[in-house]
Amino acid sequence: MRHLLRARSSASRLFSALAACAKAPPRSGAVYGFGDNSHGAVGQPAPAADVYVPTPVPSLPPSVAAVAAGHYHSLAVSAVGEVWAWGRNEEGQLGRGLNAPRNTWSKPEQVRGLENVQVRSVSASGVVSAAIGCDGSLWVWGRSKRGQLGLGKDIVEATVPCRVQALASYDVVKVSFGWGHAMALTKDGGLFGWGYSENGRLGVMGRSTQAPSPQEYIGKMGDKYSSSMMDAVEKMVAEKIRSEDNMPIIWEPSLVHEVCHLELIALY
């Protein structure tokens, strides 16, 4: 568990959002981090592990307008729209290539490939990072076998930020990551989803047969595996692992029709 704070003057706020690019300049300040630093996501140099008090994240621009915390890495947007990243990079979610030395991961560096994009906000999952430009464009990078990039069928890796072309004609205002899936909200109120779609987490387009609970599975397999409850549980786990080869995935952002009649104002 880890937290990021962005401090301005004597006050501090969690995860402040970047103001609209065309309006007044965004409020900005320094970034403080605390919590688990085993992957470098708090921004403190190795071998620092847990950080118990809010501590300034070094090497960032003096004015940061927005921050985001993934599971093992962190992102920041400078006051001029640059994106900085630090923490785990096993899946390339820092945007500095897969060969970046591990001892450099904890040091914030500017994400390569967004030099011509003025970014207004960022978001992160465990394995993927995303940035929204002032023009409403959505950019993603990292690696996910569950389609979380949204870049097209069977595309599971992006070592540099790539624009999500399926949303190129929309003005994206918010993106949010779940476990293996993602959703985006557009300025006109459209909700799009993509990625791992099991159990209907992406609406009807992701409808699939819900996997039985351990108790249900044991009941169904009881006759065959009556010798031991543990045998039944182990069988369920083995079949779940095998199902990874045939995961229900929506590879590109698709409109969630079930909420089209609603006026959506926020996405979390």
Image: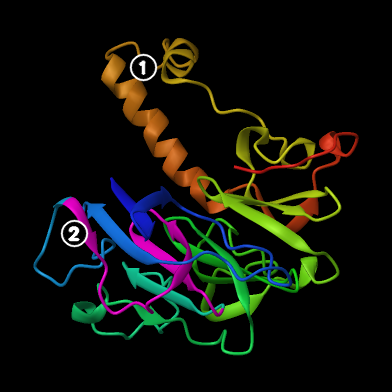
Front residue of 126/222: it is 126
Front residue of 96/197: it is 96
Q: Quadrant of the N terminus?
A: top left
Residue 57 part of the magenta-drawn span: yes
Q: Quarter of the image holding residue 205? A: top right
Name the colouring of the figure: rainbow
> Residue tagged by mark 2?
38
> Residue tagged by mark 1?
225
**Image side of residue 15 versus residue 205, left or right:** left
**Image side of residue 27 versus residue 189, left or right:** left
What residue lies at 35% left-to-right and 62% top-to-bottom? 73
In the rendered image, the vertical position of residue 159 relative to residue 151, given as above or below: below
Task: Please rate how many residues cluster around mark 2, counting C-alpha atoms within 10 Å: few if below 14, some from 14 to 19, many from 20.
Answer: some
Q: Quarter of the image holding residue 117? A: bottom right
Task: Please rate how many residues cluster around mark 1, counting C-alpha atoms within 10 Å: few if below 14, some from 14 to 19, many from 20.
Answer: some
x, y percent for residue 137: 72, 71
Disc 1 is placed on an element classified as: loop
Which range of residues does the magenta coloring cover? 53-80
In the rendered image, the vertical position of residue 90 relative to residue 219, given as above or below: below
Q: Is residue 89 visible?
A: no
